[in-house]
Amino acid sequence: MYSHLRRDSISDVIVAESLEKRFDDVVAVDRIDFAVREGEIFGFLGPNGAGKTTTMKMIQCVSPKTAGTLRVFGMDVSTRPRQIKQHLGVVPQENNLDPDFTAYQNLTIYARYFGIPRKTAEERAEELLDFMQLREKSDVLIDKLSGGMKRRLIIARALVNDPELLILDEPTIGLDPQARHLIWEKLKEIQAQGNTQVMTTHYLDEAARLCDRLVIMDHGKILVEGSPGSLISEYAGTDIVEADSTPQVMACLDAIGASYDAVGDVVQVFTGRPHDVVRALMESCSHEKVLARPATLEDVFLKLTGRTLRE
Amino acid sequence: MVDLGLSRITGSALYVWRRNWDAFIKTYRVNFIPPFVEPLLYLLALGYGLGAFVEAIDGIPYPQYIAPALVSISVMYSAFFECTYSSFVRMYYQKTFDAIIAAPLSIEDVIAGEILWGATRGTIYATLMLPVLIAFGVVDLPTSFLLIPFALPAGLLFACIGMCFTAITPGIDALNYPSFLFITPMFLFSGTFFPLDILPEQVQYFAIAFLPLTHVVNVNRAITLTAFSPFVLFSLVWIGVVTVIFFVIALRLMRRRLIV
């Protein structure tokens, strides 16, 4: 699709090596390495302040890196920001649609920033309003749109230049389930057309559903990298059994030699044989509140980044 | 070579200008009122009301004396306020600058476009005022048509100065400081409604050295009275030099504020 751009490797759209970002004395991104392959959806997960958004902004060429290398489409972000941005679509965390204009005008005016001719921009705006199911909101001012509509419009705006790479910073933040599902569906459709996507999200179900590969960051460093499935099986096992955190339950678990974590008033057993654990608990402790469930990305996330609240 | 940020300005700055033009046109009815009403009120109240008690200044009837000042003030207000309060709203509340720099534009493109727009707005206001002044017969013709092209550099001057304040202000309320402590005194003490030479000598020198409006009024008065002197040339040079200085400072301060 973008053979006219010089590339390091045909399969890597973004390559970061020892990428670092400092704000005065604070290290926001601490010499991280990652590579995003063409056509995949790549996720950045992590608690607040982990360095996700800062990394996104460096990829977008709007925040200069402190050290290391960062290449997008094979081009250095510090020397060729315009060429890179020409092929980027950005969905920022904070809605920054232009409130002086209607939904339709937001798209055509944004297209102009890319030097897209008016006629092409108008056709593109129509297509995108249809695609994001905003047709009937075409002439509505931004203030009159619901949160979900604004988010859909901002995705439409990010697509106005037909980007090779989409950068999504918490694309479904604050949306109801219907709006989230619609956006997920659309992002998958866009991916199917050959688009590469990089996203941050706090919704781990969203990451598990959308991301081909992801990293979990904390304190500016990448803790782990892999597909959601491989990370779950590696760090959380296949299943989790939960029961009330009582001395009897703990005694039972000790008796069968299962290792467990006490989390608040619940004990969690990370296990590959949930039936055995549940049976042992039911039989020996005759306990009522026993729950067996598949391990999720959330379990991996909390295990790796801890349960301490972040600001 | 020192990096002044000028190399990061491209023709894309015009897209930013165009965005503001589009927004202005959408609300043109409101926007077109001040340039018609303001000169009318000032001319009637000051020019003819107060002017009835004022002798001719240097042989010039009072309405004729203040007419070029009214244009100068209007250019100052429209360009300065556009690049302070309005630019601040776009930058801080609407996050419009953030949205634009995600496209292939630099922050310098955005600031240059904003400043050019501020100056354009001043020029539009000067253009709209001119028919009113002509109708009252208080400006010479055809020289007074020069008010229009000169409004652009005059507007650039105030737009650049305004943008510097926008770049350093902690919040929108703090923009009241330059408005009341800089713009309002200038409105009164720049040879607008009475000649500078009745003021103490030191104040005159201060006005000529540091008050941009003094030079804009000087040039505009030469235009409307068709009375050019070497002092006009000095004012033009002053305006040019100060505009360039504040333009470079505005670019630098905005980069420091927005690119982190």
Image (cartoon, rainbow, N blue to C red):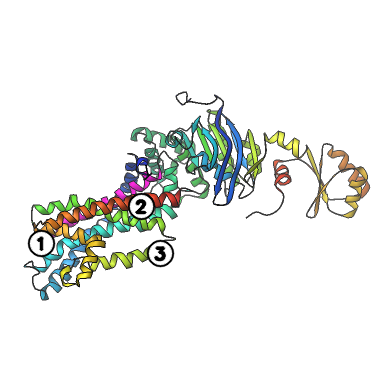
Magenta highlight: main SS: helix
Residue type, label 3: Ala
Instruction: Give residue B174's mark.
Output: 3
Residue type, label 2: Ile
x, y (%) of residue A265?
A: 80, 55
Give residue B78's quadrant in the image: bottom left
Give residue A80's quadrant in the image: top left
Chain of the residue under the numbered disc 3 shown in the image: B
Q: Residues within 10 Å of mark 2 (few under 14, many from 20)?
A: some
Instruction: Give residue B249's mark.
Output: 2
Q: Secondary structure at mark 3?
A: helix
User: Going by the image, does B190 lie left or right of B59?
Assistant: right
Residue designated by label 1? B138
Establish whether labels 2 and 3 are both on one chain. yes
Chain of the residue under the numbered disc 2 shown in the image: B
User: Going by the image, does A108 lie left or right of A62?
Assistant: left
User: Does the segment drawn in magenta span residue B114?
Assistant: yes
